[in-house]
Amino acid sequence: MKKFLLPVFLIASLNAFAQQPNQAKIEELTESQWQHGLSLLNDMVSMPNDAFYPEQIEVNIAWCENQFDMRGYSTERLKTSGIPLLLVEKKQPGATKTALFYFHVDGQAVDRSKWLQPDPYTPVLKTQNQKGEWEIIPMEKLKSEYNPDWRIYARSSSDDKGPIAMFLTGWDALAEAGISPNYNVKIILDFEEEQGSPLLPKAVIDYKEKLAADLMLIMDGPRHTSNEPTLSYGARGISDMTLTTYGPKLPQHSGHYGNYAPNPAFLLAQLLASMKDSEGRVSIPGYYDGIEFSESEKAIFAAVPDDEDAINKRLGLGRTDQVGKSYQESIQYPSLNIRGMRSAWVGPEARTIIPDVALAELVIRLVPESDPNRLFGLIEKHIQGQGFTVLDHEPSDEERMKYPKIVKMTKSISYQAFRTPMDSEAGAWLRKAMVRAYGKDPVQIRISGGSIPISPFVDALGIPAVTIPTVNADNNQHSPNENLRLGNYKEGIYAIISVLTEPLN
């Protein structure tokens, strides 16, 4: 019996050691699956994925089901009143902990005329020439060459199909080496994130037991602008508001009625301008209430290696809003942004008229300290203070005659912000994995400026959540010519392998 137990003990010890590959081994494992990983990425981004078209999303759901089925995962569509979520799961023998990963599969809509390639859904490989322009080179080069600065251009290459391909590639590398995590893996795939994930909050509550986990890992968003390995401990939430002002019932000849019929575009412009001061700060009383920073929190902001001169140069900014004293501090506050305005016609369709309506869509990025309903109330009170009557419907003829200045206000909340303490066990666990992957500490972001629908999970499941951003910051996500830098793709696979092999006890 003793002779039998010793070899078993040694095998178990060796296997436990193998579960934590060092940096060199991680790179070796990645290299073994590199060509396979490139093929996965190109396959994924070749599928149109605009959630406005459910038929496109169905193709993506089926592809994901097939890929995870092939790897021994169970898959289940979580039904909603619209597009389902997809839950995939892999249980590990003897595991006592579970990590829940989040990815989204849908992408932003495309304007093909703005893409510098034949088709946004046909990936191309590009290199930067001496003029700083990105030019297409043969994809076949990747079979024998590698340049970390080459980029694959396609919709969703970075946001968010690239990270999914990283995960699958890293999983396959570990499987080929006979290595597996010591915890159960659940993955939730969201197919309406770019539409605001309208059905997700209810689904998380409805499927709370199926989603139960010990922590959540979000694979979305770009690294810090330095392109150093990054961890982000929170994300702002998002809500929106639409304001409509009214002029004549129908557009009128500006010669006949100019200086007489009020122009709703001017009314709207004056109203919007009253909401911020000349330094870009929201001037509505109480908007920033409840937000204060300790010295330790200020130190966290200062530790992030932002090069604000470089950021401003890249964005072409001669000045910045003065909401915070730095970039990091500025994103700790709720924002108020005009995402679009419309009134009458411009360009070749322009007419010399006084328009009938003017419309503005506003977005509020939320932080944990900001209750969106409170902010809505403050904005409505401010609008009333500017002499407007606020309605939630189209004004009737009687209301038009009764109220001289009318605003129709509609609003919605997509999801709240979340923030996990940096000194949490989840943070410490992830930092260990990142140091093993890269040989250095990651940049740590207290809360990111963008929004991802994670607060429903944090609130319903009662678990910490941390984001592992992997893609390059200059990836043009949400814009034409979205891209993924090859060096980031490879290093993202490093992160996946390291996280999957970091013991979770």
Image: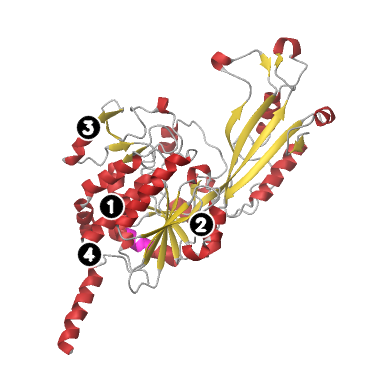
Q: Foreground residue, 465 or 324?
A: 465
Q: CA distance from mark 3 to mark 1?
A: 23 Å
N-terminal-most mark, 3 or 4: 3
Q: Looking at numbered disc 3 in the image, what kind of residue is underneath it?
A: Pro
Disc 4 target residue: 178
Disc 1 target residue: 169
Which label lies toward us, 4 or 2? Answer: 4
- CB of mark 4 within 8 Å of CB of mark 1? no
- The label on residue 297 is 2
Name the residue at 43% across, 34% down. 479
Q: Position of residue 136 (x, y in %)?
A: 27, 29
- CB of mark 4 within 8 Å of CB of mark 2? no
Q: Answer with left or right where residue 137 lies relative to residue 91.
A: left
Which label lies toward us, 1 or 2? Answer: 1
Q: Looking at numbered disc 4 in the image, what kind of residue is underneath it?
A: Gly
Disc 3 target residue: 138
Q: Foreground residue, 101 or 88?
A: 88
Which label lies toward us, 3 or 2? Answer: 3
Q: Position of residue 306 (x, y in %)?
A: 42, 45
The span picked out in magenta is 430-434
Q: CA distance from mark 3 to mark 4?
A: 35 Å
Image quadrant holding the C terminus, namely: bottom left
